[in-house]
Amino acid sequence: MTGLDEPFPPPGVDLSHPNVARIYDYYLGGTTNWEIDRQFADQILEAYPIIRPIAHANRMFLHRVVRHLVKSGIRQFVDIGSGVPTMGHAHEVAEHLAPGEVKVVYVDYEPVAVAHSRRVLNKHGDPSRHTVIHADMRDPERLWSRVADTGLIDLSQPVAVLLIAVLHIQQPPAPGSGRTDDLGPCLVATYRDLLAPGSYLALSHVTDEGVPPGYPEMLADLKRLYDTSSSPVVFRNRKEIADLFGDFTLLEPGVTWTPLWHPEDASDGDRTAHLASPNESLLLAGVARK
């Protein structure tokens, strides 16, 4: 299934529930997913085939962000919630613009994503510049310490943190904490504080505000389906998404639909996402500088 020799899944991987990283991999045409993930995804795609081009539009946003920031001089990236390596990861995009210069640390909590990323990086990456760590974004200080421990990233210098299609997945408090709210906004605030001046934060996030007619009903149905899986979701409006950037300075054009963010940074090799209108992408996105 993976196209690689080592058996999958890695020991301890939960295949009793569909997983959002593996489902997303399937939407993008990847192979690091299992029957339980494909059954869940196929149920959604049968009802809402638009989900696949939405996923492609989001991945192409990631590609344009990396190109734009590399052109702006950024040479360090931390991709949190990076998922499995499908359709070009950040280091592959960066390598075309600045060969041998860009360092990338991928971070994920999903064992399959980490194991597969490690094998891909061992085969197609540069261990002196590219690595993956298994860490929980709900513990920012520990995650940041793990990033420092890799020895690849100088956290005293500007870094681009990527939170692409991550924050609409609810980040529940630890059991026994007494909290029931989604931790996403306060976690992002902590990551902003950890960043050195001159760093960047890039994110994309599903919204149910300003979408085409009929799409709020689709999103409500999708929320119901995901909430019954292991990955409940939360939708935010434009203001709530803009607030995630705090007092960072948003790059033009600000918070916008994924296809509208710097389309001039597209590459001839990028996949076209066939959407009737930008708001059909359902994800608002932006990049801001500290």
Image (spheres, rainbow, N blue to C red):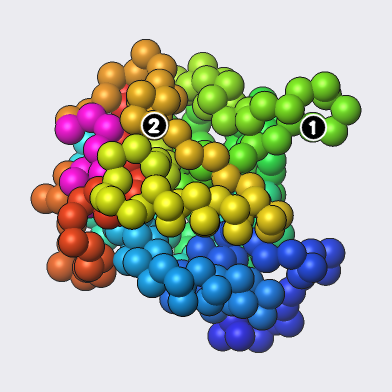
Residue 79: image x %, image y %? 49, 45
| Residue located 79% across and 32% down the image | 174
Residue 157: image x %, image y %? 42, 25
The answer to whether one can see residue 234 in this image is yes
SS state under label 2: loop
Residue furthest to the right: 176
Q: Is residue 149 magenta?
A: no
For residue 241, what is the image quadrant? top left
Label 1 and label 2: CA atoms lie apart by: 26 Å
Q: Is residue 258 magenta?
A: yes
Residue 283: image x %, image y %? 35, 46
**Figure check: 220 above or below 11:** above
User: Could you say which is closer to the camera, residue 237 or residue 103?
Assistant: 237
* Residue 140 relative to residue 76: left or right: right
Looking at the rendering, in which quadrant would you find the N terminus? bottom right
Looking at the rendering, in which quadrant would you find the C terminus? top left
Chain part drawn in magenta:
253-261
Which residue does the numbered mark 2 point to in the structure image? 237
Name the residue type under label 2. Answer: Asn
Residue furthest to the top: 247
* Residue 272 relative to residue 177: left or right: left
Which residue does the numbered mark 1 point to in the structure image? 174
User: Could you say which is closer to the camera, residue 249 or residue 238?
Assistant: 238
| Numbered circle sitting on residue 198 | none
Residue 208: image x %, image y %? 39, 42
Q: Residues within 10 Å of mark 1 (few under 14, many from 20)?
A: few
